[in-house]
Image: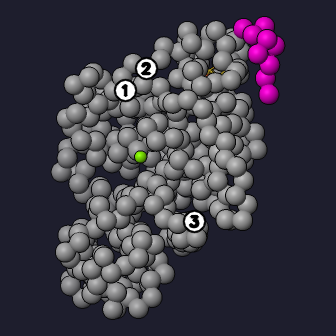
């Protein structure tokens, strides 16, 4: 059986005056029909570049997809002409970003923007398009839709604007919804409401979702599987259960310690991960986490760890788990 989206060995670089920035190297993953996948990691880990590659929205130059395949609806998107890609982005993939203002036109009413999408991609008549727009605003929980359609983006609150963006992204019933940090700019209460809405919509319309976030606390309610990225690579992937209950990569341990609580009362102290991510202009030879890892061994700095499958679907790239890792170093450093 085929996956809805299958990314195979994707590498994307940016060619800057200072040299090649290897933003994404050798990333492989899939998303099934009706499934929500979370991609988690600090800023600069390559999660946004990964989905921008999938959508073929890498600014080029300086960016370039160097290698890999992105199979979606029976086509390899890496090879697809831009014209067909525009159609795919309009109809089959929906996108939500952190700041809705970057994708909403400030001088057009919400109704005008929504109906234009429907007229262009679905060939709907004006009234038909208005009716669909109203129905979708209602679906994302915006009251007084008829009046709201006549308003401009600035007349909506941050949370309401994000709801509008979600409605717009879903207008043409896309197979895949890509949400890049959709709640990061919102306060915690609104964050929780938007996540609740996305969960609710996933049940109702059965769209597949990729949710990108720097916050592991955000994905659990919505996603069934999680990918953890670090330094342009996938360091751990598994089910929500695998990642929360039995994380195996030291970076994932660090992320879990820095999960903020959604309820404001339990403001537990967050433990930041010390140090900074690797410079992707000069990617480390071995494991990218070596400089920050409390469990690093000699081999970590010398050779990149291969992928170990702990159990079906739970994969980790760390020397601690590699069958070829020198066993003696385990004892010296001590595993947790
Ligand atoms: Fe730490 Fe080594 Fe594992 Fe990298 S491979 S996370 S440095 S133990
Ligand atoms: Mg980003």
The local secondary structure at tag 1 comes to strand
Query: At 64% across and 24% down in the image, what residue appears?
Result: 293
234 to the left or right of 329 = left
Q: CA distance from mark 1 to mark 2?
A: 7 Å
31 to the left or right of 104 = right
Query: At 33% across and 27% down in the image, what residue appears?
Result: 21
Q: Is 97 situated above or below 330? A: below
N-terminal-most mark, 3 or 2: 3
Question: Which stretch did the figure color magenta?
Answer: 326-336
Q: x, y (%) of residue 286?
A: 53, 15
Task: Give the overall secondary structure of the magenta segment.
Answer: helix
Query: At 51% across and 50% down in the image, what residue appears?
Result: 213
Q: Is 76 situated above or below 169? A: above
Q: Nearer the viewer, residue 297 or 212?
A: 297
Judging by the rendered image, the residue that carries numbered circle 2 is 283
Q: CA distance from mark 3 to mark 2?
A: 35 Å
Judging by the rendered image, the residue that carries numbered circle 3 is 188
Q: Nearer the viewer, residue 4 or 235?
A: 235
Q: Are marks 3 and 1 in contact (CB under 8 Å)?
A: no
Judging by the rendered image, the residue that carries numbered circle 1 is 22
Instruction: Determine whether the beta carbon of the residue marked 2 sits less than 8 angstroms from the nearest atom of ligand 1.
Output: no
Query: At 69% across and 36% down in the image, what residue appears?
Result: 253
87 to the left or right of 321 = left
The local secondary structure at tag 2 comes to loop
Residue 102: name its quadrant: bottom left
The question of residue 53 being in magenta is answered with no
Q: x, y (%) of residue 143?
A: 45, 88
């Amino acid at each position: 059986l085929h996956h809805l989206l299958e990314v195979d060995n994707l590498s994307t670089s940016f060619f800057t005056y200072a040299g090649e920035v290897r933003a994404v190297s050798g990333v492989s993953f899939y998303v099934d029909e009706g499934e929500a996948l979370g991609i988690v990691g600090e800023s600069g880990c390559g999660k946004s570049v990964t989905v921008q590659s999938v959508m073929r929205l890498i600014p080029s130059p300086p960016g370039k997809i160097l290698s890999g395949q992105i199979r979606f609806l029976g086509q390899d998107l890496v090879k697809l002409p831009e014209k067909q890609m525009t159609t795919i982005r309009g109809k089959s993939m929906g996108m939500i970003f952190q700041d809705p203002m970057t994708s909403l036109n400030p001088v057009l009413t919400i109704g005008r923007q929504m109906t234009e999408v429907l007229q262009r991609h679905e060939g709907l008549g004006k009234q038909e398009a208005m009716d669909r727009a109203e129905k979708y605003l209602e679906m994302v929980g915006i009251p007084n839709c008829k009046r709201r359609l006549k308003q401009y983006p600035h007349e909506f609150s941050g949370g309401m604007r994000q709801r509008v963006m979600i409605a717009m992204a879903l207008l043409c019933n896309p197979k895949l919804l890509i949400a890049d940090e959709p709640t990061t700019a919102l306060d915690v209460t609104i964050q929780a409401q938007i996540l609740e809405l996305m969960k609710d919509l996933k049940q109702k319309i059965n769209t597949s979702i990729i949710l990108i976030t720097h916050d592991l606390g955000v994905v659990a309610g919505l996603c069934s599987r999680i990918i953890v990225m670090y330094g342009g690579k996938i360091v751990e992937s598994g089910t929500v259960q695998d990642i929360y209950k039995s994380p195996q990569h030291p970076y994932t341990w660090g992320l879990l310690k820095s999960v903020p609580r959604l309820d404001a009362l339990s403001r537990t102290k967050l433990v930041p991960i010390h140090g900074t991510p690797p410079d992707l202009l000069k990617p480390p030879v071995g494991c990218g986490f070596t400089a920050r890892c409390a469990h690093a061994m000699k081999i970590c700095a010398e050779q990149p760890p291969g992928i170990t499958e702990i159990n079906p679907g739970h994969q980790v790239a760390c020397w601690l788990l590699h069958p070829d890792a020198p066993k003696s170093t385990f004892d010296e450093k001590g595993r947790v």
